[in-house]
Amino acid sequence: MGKRSAPRVAVLIDGEVTVHMASDDGNYDTLCGLDENDPEIGFEPAEVPLNGRARIDCEHCRSLWKSAQKYTRSDFKDTP
């Protein structure tokens, strides 16, 4: 069985495509808090293939990921 790739979100921000870690909190599309479809501030969904090979290039997502690596499941209250 091959390794599953984590979901990614491509966002077009003022003409430049950035690739982010996807969020599953329901409020934002990216881990760093962007909504991929917010034309009022210049964000649009980007048309790039996100087949697991797209590299995440958002420094904010990277920083959050690095910080989260310090924790394990047992650090959370709702974990048995």
Image (spheres, rainbow, N blue to C red):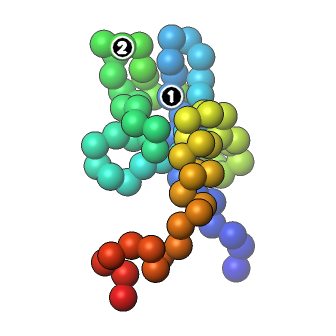
Residue 47 visible somewhere in the drawing: no
Asked whether, in this view, residue 4 is left or right of residue 31, the answer is: right
Q: Which residue is drawn at 70% across and 41% down?
A: 55
Quadrant of residue 2 within the rendered picture: bottom right
User: Toward which corner of the image does residue 19 lie, by quadrant?
Assistant: top right
Q: Left or right of 3: which side holds 9?
A: left
Q: In the visual, does 16 lie left or right of 11? A: right
Q: Name the foreground residue: 17 vs 60.
A: 60
Q: Quadrant of the C terminus?
A: bottom left
Using the numbered discs, state the Cα–Cα distance from disc 1 to disc 2 in whole angstroms.
Answer: 12 Å
Identify residue for label 2: 41
Q: In the image, is residue 28 above or below residue 44?
A: below
Q: Tell me the number on the disc at residue 63.
A: none
Residue in the image at 62% along x and 43% along y: 62
What residue would you read off at disc 1? Answer: 11
Disc 2: CA contacts within 10 A as few (<14), some (14-19) or many (>=20): few
Residue 23 rendering spot, x and y as whole percentages: 42, 49
Mark 2 belongs to which amino acid?
A: Ile
Residue 54 rendering spot, x and y as whole percentages:
68, 42
Q: Quadrant of residue 45?
A: top left
Seen from the viewer's position, the closer of residues 16 and 73 is 73
Kind of residue at badge 1: Val
Which numbered disc flags the more N-terminal residue, 1 or 2? 1
Residue 24: percent from left, percent from top: 37, 54
| x 32%, y 52%: residue | 25
